[in-house]
Image (tube, grey):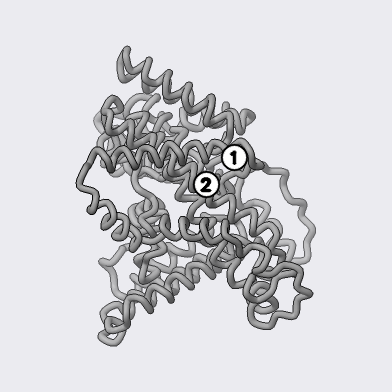
Amino acid sequence: MSFNSVIFIFLFCPFSVAAYYIALKINSRAADYVLALFSLAFYGWAFFDYIFLLFAYILVLHMVGKYIEKRDKENGIFTNLGRKWIFIFFIVVAIGLLGYYKYSNFIIGSINSLTGSSFATLNIIVPLGISYITFSSISFLVDVYREDASVNGLVDTFIYILMFPKVACGPILLYKNFKNDFRIDPYNLDNMVAGINRIIVGLAKKVILANYFGTILTNMTLTGMDTVTGIASIFIYSFQLYLDFSGYTDMAIGLGMLFGYKLPENFIKPYSSKSIKEFWRRWHASLGAWFKEYVYIPLGGSRVSKTRNLVNLMIVFAITGIWHGAGVNYIIWGMMHGICTVYDRLVEQNRIYKRIPNFIKWICTFSVVCIGWQFFRYSTVAEFNTLIKDVILFNDNNVTFTWIYYLNAKFIAISIISILCSFSFTDNIIAAVLSRVNNDRLVLLIKQTLLIVLLALGIIATISTTYSPFIYFRY
């Protein structure tokens, strides 16, 4: 049940919010149970066969958390050594389940390719949001083991792992921050309005902008593109990916606010970055925070020698690539970003580098990011090579699709709007325009009127177009 589906927009979302606020009239605990129940229903709609397994998984996770937070004098046989081994065992179990569902067939295929064997691949359906569930589980266990957080009631564990606004694609919450830093007053009118507005913006990004670019890309085949179209497709896909994923995040954050949770920002205009290092502070920021907390710092972070620090960065980005998917293309993408980040670290204090105009740094960074996204767009490295070599550099295609087919008034308008949504320099332009309007009520009226129009357009697009799931559901 995707956020951009008719059943979610018209049934599940309003019904769950209404039920939550009715329960909130009783007490906050009743509201928590309602949120947990609807989160279970949301997940069961997509993967009912897994719902009992998931229920058992969270129950065991909660019990393990209770055990490892106990002290020697309280837990009998569970000494500090025992706590440590139980903690390690269940971390391995969590990672092992992720590896089984996401990487088993990739490993089998790699073994077959390298050895000439013919092991049969497994008939596996990857559960919705397993990567995010696994990372949340690890955060839960690590923070409890470190004594950075305590285990509350079972319903709290369920909400942390399974809360439906974030379960499929994040943002990823650190457990130690979950109960305190992310709670807000759901009855606050400003929070409710801000949440609804965020949902409207996210829906529009997905169904009006991202889906339009997706429709164009479906006609751009590697065997029929001219060079101009090949280059354009790189940037079109990059905008589609950003608008699709940030649109989901906007809707997740908006939904979270309606349920009393201020989920962390995940996208801070990442395409405005002037280095890959900066890009990763802006793109999927919650994922970066997770890797920093549970991988980079435990490896030694920046407290080790410079060489070891650079190795640590490469390890983090290698894992980042593998986390995104089972395939050589994802590993290459991760290592590509790792190498660029290492380069940034090596030259950031160089006097010559500091003199390079920011505009040049931005062009280089944006180009690297957009080219890197093609490893997501194409399932194999061979297809990526075809795009670069046979389409862009040495085009010898029998061209059937050129820029003439898509360069029209609608494409130009959608592209301009997408740029306004994607780059931070537009924030200054919008702020300058609004500053000329001194009447705050007039600004609010204009803003809400535009959002109502945007909601209407989003609903029309949702109903009239073919259902298109969020791209990041596959990761």
What residue is drawn where x is 52% and y is 46%? 206
Per the image, label 1 sits on a secondary structure element best described as loop
Q: Residue 265 at x, y = what percent?
A: 35, 48
Q: How far separated are the C-alphas under marks 1 and 2?
A: 23 Å
Q: Residue 366 at x, y = what percent?
A: 45, 70
Residue 76, image quadrant: top left
Q: Is residue 379 visible?
A: yes
Q: Along the horizontal axis of the image, is 155 left or right of 408? A: left
Quadrant of the drawing holding the N terminus: top right
What residue is drawn where x is 66% and y is 68%? 404
What residue is drawn where x is 38% and y is 77%? 343
Vertical order, 146 against 62 (above or below): below
Residue 29, image quadrant: top left
What residue is disc 2 on? 206
Nearer to us in this view, 420 or 343 = 420
Looking at this view, name the residue that lies furthest to the top. Answer: 26
Vertical order, 133 against 259 (above or below): below
Going by the numbered disc 2, the residue's amino acid type is Lys
Going by the numbered disc 1, the residue's amino acid type is Pro
Q: Earlier in the sequence, mark 1 or mark 2?
A: 1
Which is closer to the viewer, label 1 or label 2?
2
Nearer to us in this view, 66 or 394 = 394
Looking at this view, name the residue that lies furthest to the bottom. Answer: 352
Q: Along the horizontal axis of the image, is 101 left or right of 339? A: right
- Judge the density around disc 1: few (<14), some (14-19), many (≥20) Cα neighbours within 10 Å: many
Residue 374, image quadrant: bottom right
What residue is disc 1 on? 127
